Amino acid sequence: MKTILALTTALLLSACSPQNAEVNLYSARKEALIKPLLDAFTAETGITVNIISGKDDALLERIKSEGLNSPADLLITTDAGRLHRAKQAGIFTAVDSAILKQNIPANYRDSDDAWFGLSVRARPIMVTNAKPNIEISRYEDLTNPALQQQICIRSSDNIYNQSLVASMLAASTNTEVEGWVSGLVANFARPPQGGDRDQIRAAAAGQCSVVVANTYYLANMLADKANQADFNAASAMTVIWPNQQDRGTHVNVSGAGLINTAPNKENGIKLIEFLASDTAQKMYADVNFEYPVKEGVELNPILASWGPFKADALSLDMLGKNNADAVKVMDRAGWK
């Protein structure tokens, strides 16, 4: 069965490109978001990129199922927690690249060079323009009883929230974080439901006044003026950068790893290096509304409008290492 699956995939990728200068990419990013970057890579290098798109966990399982016969060269996925899972599954091989070490800060790449962050995804607090009646400057403030029935956030099975809690476990004790999660749950305006955009829409509709969400969702809603309802909802929100006087705002990454059975290893490394270049980093900001991992890259105007912020400098390795404990803490605190 594994052989048939691998053969089918190889034929599909072969049909996409008969050329030898190619790289086979398994991508959990929406093709419309990443295609412009891949086209720019092909234009610069002449190397064709064959894409298999899918859900994050499904692609990981597919590579594991294909085994030694997998045609995959690279896996691109979101969240350091998922990248850690892929590393633990043994599908990545280390890449020793001076370009990647120069362009990507150490805390945004794996300590064993198994994966590399390519874009930064901030998860701050957002409040409606009719702000709550207390000052919010830290994630810890979200447990204030004055915010009872005021907070909208998605469920605990979402890895973005798991990584947020994992980052807090790196900064505090399990007991302290469990107390924080319990206080947060006590202030929920409604049972967790939907994605980050849904939390923003709920706030704009008056169901809550405080949201925890990734900024690129807000930016996409502001940029899509054809969707007037979403534009209006996003326009009603103010971004608060938490914990600026201590550890900084929680951030995560999308990233890539080279598959240990990659048939086109050199081309795969060239693609990761390109995605960490000035050209691609600027495109990440303009197409995906994510922050660049490389310093000195110009921000998209929407991102720049929210001002500079101090990001948590935690090594993102810890998000994966703390994930299991984070899930247990959330379960015990009743975060559905």
Image (spheres, rainbow, N blue to C red):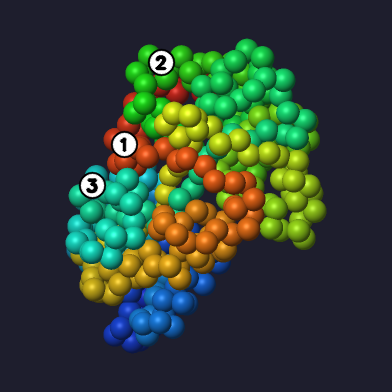
Residues tagged 2 and 1 counted as in contact (Cβ below 8 A):
no
Asked which quadrant contains residue 321, the reply is top left
Residue 116 placement, left or right of 183: left
Q: Residue at x 46, y 77 (%)?
A: 40
Residue 206 placement, left or right of 98: right
Q: Foreground residue, 330 or 248?
A: 248
Other-residue count near label 1 (Cα within 10 Å), few / some / many at <14 / 14–19 / ≥20: some
Other-residue count near label 2 (Cα within 10 Å), few / some / many at <14 / 14–19 / ≥20: few
The residue tagged with tag 1: helix, strand or loop? helix
> Residue 177 in the image: x percent, y percent?
42, 20
Q: Amino acid at mark 2?
A: Glu
Q: Amino acid at mark 3?
A: Ser
Q: Which residue is mark 1?
A: 318
Q: Which residue is mark 2?
A: 176
The residue tagged with tag 2: helix, strand or loop? helix
Q: Foreground residue, 210 or 82?
A: 210
Asked which quadrant contains residue 9, the reply is bottom left
325 shown above or below 307: above
Q: CA distance from mark 2 to mark 3?
A: 27 Å
Q: Amino acid at mark 1?
A: Met
Q: CA distance from mark 1 to mark 3?
A: 10 Å
> Residue 71 in the image: x percent, y percent?
28, 69
Residue 58 seen by the camera:
no
Residues tagged 2 and 3 counted as in contact (Cβ below 8 A):
no
Q: Residue at x 55, y 66 (%)?
A: 32
